[in-house]
């Protein structure tokens, strides 16, 4: 086991097909030792099954600290859903509490949101949440994103984001701020095409602001968006200049940088090529969501091993996993949270981003 623990880690967060590991998936995790596994709605039936799946993943990796991540933002994007789990509010709803009932009420609801979600995740063996979303909402913001934002105010977004980041850390869950450096202005859904931000960098400083204020976050996710003033060809995820000058430079982020899903149509090329290009550009790891074992193996091969610098960033992430969730009276917190969030009307948006690519694949019979 000690020898295995020294085995290099693949710079990839892969995904699996179902609610339990197949023999092939177990072997894949043993062989490639990915940085982590991202879970989706297809992987989750109930609490006991989810806890068993995460146990199987740790057992296959022979590592308690393998990242097991999920998108549990709230609103439409919640992989742990009813009836087993609480129906958490979207960030849009949380942002509206401040506009309607004041900043203090909103901040309270945001922390309760984090506390309750942290307990759900910890209880089921999950240690990373791909949240908070720090993108800003504009009139033109694509439907896939709009209800997932706190709003258009960059200062309030930074305040709510800080409560989430620090709350998750305190409760032993690694937060992952997204989508750097901000793609709230785009009208193209990156699941389906490549968004381009034609605004000058000076104007985009508003979008960068929440990420700058939370540049100390332990992990962050890139945006598949082209910013022509920096790199007219490559989306930030695959742009060495974009990552170096904007994410690591202007924003000052030095945490673990994970690509957004490389299965999205915003990135072109074969899956292995996409992984290779993201790592070459400066991502610490790539995220693959499709659940196909052959593709996952190819991603691990082409992403290669985590660099020494990436491993230092990962060490900081691992350290916070030791923190435990403390809720003095879970039901009282839940009642108060429901009282605060229940007053706000939900964003009227029927676009469901959850696993949209997987549904497209099923429709095509892939």
Image (cartoon, rainbow, N blue to C red):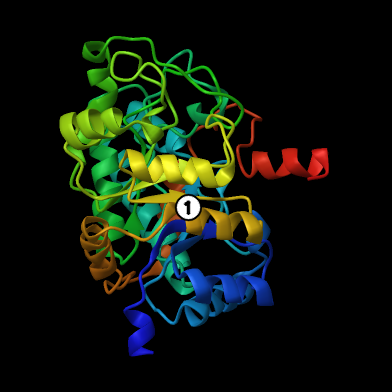
Q: Does 179 sit above or below residue 256?
A: above
What is the residue that sits farthest to the bottom in this orientation? 1
The x, y position of residue 91, in whole percent, is 43, 38
| Vertical relation: 49 (above or below) 253 | below
Identify the residue at image location x=28%, y=9%: 200
Q: Position of residue 43 (x, y in %)?
A: 64, 62
Of 151 and 259, the residue lying toward us: 259
Is the C terminus in the top left, top right, bottom left or bottom right quadrant? top right
Quarter of the image with the N terminus is bottom left
Q: Is residue 18 left or right of residue 106?
A: right
Image coordinates of residue 249 in percent, x first then y, are 17, 33
Percent position (x, y) of residue 236? 36, 30
- In the rendered image, which residue does mark 1 sit on? 302
In this view of the protein, can residue 331 be seen by the observer? no
Q: Is residue 311 visible?
A: yes
> Quick one: SS at disc 1?
helix
Residue drawn at (50%, 30%), measured in percent from left and top? 145
Q: Which residue occupies 28% across, 34% down? A: 243
Quadrant location of residue 101? top left
Q: Nearer the viewer, residue 328 or 121?
A: 121
Position of 330 relative to 147 (above/below): below
């Amino acid at each position: 086991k000690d020898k295995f623990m020294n085995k290099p880690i693949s710079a990839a967060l892969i995904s699996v097909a179902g609610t339990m590991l197949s023999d092939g998936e177990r072997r894949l995790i043993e062989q490639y030792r990915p940085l982590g596994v991202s879970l989706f709605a297809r992987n989750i039936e109930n609490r006991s099954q989810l806890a068993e799946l995460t146990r199987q993943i740790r057992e296959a990796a022979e590592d308690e600290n393998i990242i097991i991540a999920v998108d549990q933002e709230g609103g439409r994007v919640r992989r742990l859903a009813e009836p087993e789990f609480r129906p958490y509010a979207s960030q849009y709803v949380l942002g509206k509490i401040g506009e309607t009932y004041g900043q203090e009420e909103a901040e309270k609801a945001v922390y309760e949101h984090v506390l309750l979600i942290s307990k759900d995740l910890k209880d089921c063996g999950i240690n990373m949440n791909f949240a908070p979303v720090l993108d800003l909402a504009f009139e033109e913001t694509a439907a896939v994103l709009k209800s997932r934002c706190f709003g258009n105010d960059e200062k309030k977004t930074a305040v709510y984001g800080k409560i989430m980041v620090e709350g998750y850390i305190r409760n032993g869950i690694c937060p992952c701020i997204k989508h750097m450096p901000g793609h709230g202005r785009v009208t193209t859904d990156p699941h389906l095409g490549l968004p381009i931000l034609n605004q000058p960098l000076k104007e985009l400083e508003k979008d960068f602001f929440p990420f700058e204020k939370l540049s100390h976050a332990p992990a962050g996710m890139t945006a598949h968006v082209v910013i022509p003033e920096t790199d007219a060809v490559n989306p930030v995820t695959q742009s060495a200049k974009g990552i170096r000058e904007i994410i690591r430079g202007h924003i000052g982020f030095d945490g673990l940088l994970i690509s957004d899903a490389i299965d999205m149509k915003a990135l072109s090329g074969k899956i292995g090529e996409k992984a290779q290009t993201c790592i070459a550009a400066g991502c610490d790891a790539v995220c693959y969501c499709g659940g196909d074992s052959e593709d996952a193996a190819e991603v691990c091969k082409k992403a290669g091993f985590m660099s020494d610098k990436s491993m230092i960033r990962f060490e900081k992430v691992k350290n916070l996993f030791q923190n435990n969730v403390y809720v003095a009276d879970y039901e009282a917190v839940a009642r108060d949270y429901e009282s605060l969030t229940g007053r706000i009307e939900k964003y009227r948006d029927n676009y469901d981003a959850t696993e949209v690519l997987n549904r497209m694949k099923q429709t095509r019979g892939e």
